[in-house]
Amino acid sequence: MPRLFEGGVSAEGKKFAIIVSQFNQMVTKRLLDGAVDCFQRHGSDIEKDIDVFYCPGAFEIPEVAAKITEKGMYDAVVCLGAIVRGETPHFDYIAQECARGIGSVARERNIPLLFGVLTTDTFDQAMERSGGSIGNKGWDAALSAITMANLYTQLNTSSKRN
């Protein structure tokens, strides 16, 4: 039987950061509420184990992620934002750079950074994904952060195969 590494869903004893874009705050507040609820329901002491960092918009999320991961204090970081398509190509530039930046920081720092940034065509779609009929992507990103933090712990403590 092969060895399995699949993380787990207990947040107990882990430290998490949440970066939240203030732009489209009606949506991002709901994403944040979902993420915090998920962490709490999975064993986090939200007063001690969860830190929330606000930034102006989704474009700034990677900058904040790079800064807060410098010292290795967190087991995973959840990045939350809402980019809604408008009438100009601005959406494409912001979404692309946000995604690229988050991925770059994750690889550079060797820490899970979860992409909970909504990229929708309409504001209604964003609302549906932040606690509406489609669920709460903040919750989903937090659950993925818990799983990835546990998986990284397993990978870091597993012994080499002979």
Image (cartoon, helix red, strand yellow):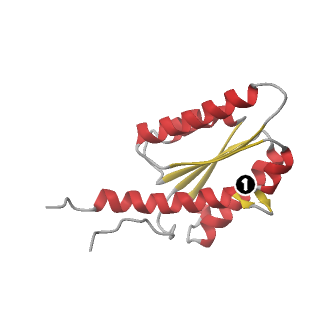
Picture quarter containing residue 154? bottom left
Q: Position of residue 133 (x, y in %)?
A: 80, 63
Question: Nearest the camera: 15 or 97?
Answer: 97
- Please indicate whether residue 62 sits to the left or right of residue 93 in the image: left
x 43%, y 63%: residue: 150
Q: Against 66, is 160 above or below?
A: below
Q: Secondary structure at mark 1?
A: helix
Q: Residue furthest bottom?
A: 1
Q: Quadrant of residue 156?
A: bottom left
Depth order, front residue of 92/54 = 92
Count every numbered label the image shows and give the total.
1
x and y percentages locating residue 114 in the rendered image: 56, 50
- Residue 42: where, in percent of width, then height? 57, 71
Question: Does 44 sit left or right of 88 as displayed?
Answer: left
In the rendered view, would you say 160 is above or below 107? below
| Three-letter residue code for mark 1 | Leu
User: Which residue is depicted at the point 61% across and 30% down?
Assistant: 97
**Rendered residue at 60%/65% (across/down):** 39
Give the residue drawn at x 62%, y 37%. Answer: 61
| Residue 101: percent from left, percent from top | 55, 33
Q: Quadrant of the C terminus?
A: bottom left
Task: Give neighbour class at mark 1: few <14, some 14-19, many 20+ (Cα, 10 Å).
Answer: many
The residue at which mark 1 appears reads as 31
Considering every residue shown, the one lying at the far left of the view is 162
Which residue is outermost to the front?
1
Quarter of the picture holding the N terminus: bottom left
